[in-house]
Image (tube, helix red, strand yellow):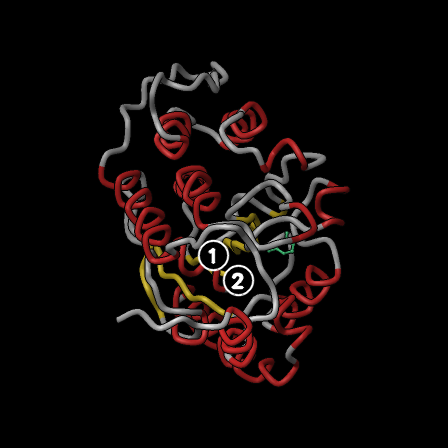
Amino acid sequence: MQTWVDPHDILRWYLDAGVDETIGETPVDRYAVSQRAQQARLTAVQNPPPATMRPGVAPVAAAPQGKAPSGVAAHIAAECSTLAELRTALEKFEGLALKQAAACTVFADGNPEAAVMCIGEAPGQEEDRQGLPFVGTSGKLLDRMLRSIGLDRSTVYITNVVPWRPPANRKPTLDEVAVCLPFVSRHIELVDPQLLILLGGTAASALLARAEGINRLRGRWFEFNSPGLPRPVPVLATFHPAYLLRTPEAKRDAWRDLLLIQKKLAAGRH
Ligand code: URA
């Protein structure tokens, strides 16, 4: 026997459960999207395409026929053998609609020879305007955080998982992150840092390929493994500076994370 339910009751039920906004016409299975993003990372790590790049020749961002954008990205990224080639490849890449709305490709800032590499989420408005990562309000806080443990942009290299500003500063989707992942993984390989700092949940989940949120991932040492690295790189995730600006009480935990990084760097110097 079917029971008729008044649509107002259903709407009331959604409101009581905290739903106050419709995002799309059809439901999205976020678990399936997340699994696809993780699978893309695993595929990129386990099956790197052969590096056929001739030295000094800029990579061509032509999409191999019939490949998914993350597969195309993995193919192109693997052919880059220098940071300059990777930057050119990103500037030519046409596999992500996000790029059309952005003013520029925000590649990196800081010292590519530095021991420490920081990776954020995606450029904001100011970054998109200047073409450099972390130069807006959260960048100012990041600079202060780094300074508190004796680092600055001459001793740190900074980039983002996604090099294009998402419209209206929205979070990049898991599919967008999956497409960018081969590029940022290759970026890490080419810099070959001694230590990686992941700023916020997007960078942490993407590069650690883990489903937990930043509250569980921060403050613990992990390793980043990739076939193009001579050895695994120690990784620490911490809160994103933008989150710390909104949630000052979390700064205490972020400070603990910074001290862990300082200790690790001091140990490496012996
Ligand atoms: N937030 C980020 O994650 N990256 C930036 O470059 C700026 C803000």
Q: Residues within 10 Å of mark 1 (few under 14, many from 20)?
A: many
Q: Residues within 10 Å of mark 2 (few under 14, many from 20)?
A: many
- Say whether mark 1 is within 8 Å of ligand 1: yes
Residue extending furthest left?
46
Q: Residue at x 30, y 52 (%)?
A: 35
The C terminus: image quadrant:
bottom left
Quick one: SS at disc 2?
A: strand
Residue 161 located left or right of residue 245: left
Q: Quadrant of residue 150?
A: bottom right
Label pair 2/1, CB-CB below 8 angstroms = yes
The N terminus: image quadrant:
bottom left
Disc sitting over residue 199 in the figure: 2
Q: Nearer the viewer, residue 135 or 156?
A: 135
Q: Quadrant of residue 179?
A: top left
Q: Residue at x 34, y 20 (%)?
A: 66
Quick one: SS at disc 1?
A: helix
Residue 115 located left or right of residue 22: left
The answer to whether residue 85 is above or below residue 257 is above
The answer to whether residue 204 is above or below residue 176 is below
Instruction: Tell which quarter ligand 1 is in.
Output: bottom right
Q: Position of residue 203 (x, y in %)?
A: 47, 56
Q: Nearer the viewer, residue 225 or 72?
A: 72
Q: Residue at x 48, y 63 (%)?
A: 201
Q: Position of residue 187 (x, y in %)?
A: 46, 40
The answer to whether residue 138 is above or below residue 164 is below
The answer to whether residue 218 is above or below residue 25 is below
Mark 2 residue type: Leu
Residue on which disc 1 sits: 203
Q: Residue at x 33, y 61 (%)?
A: 210
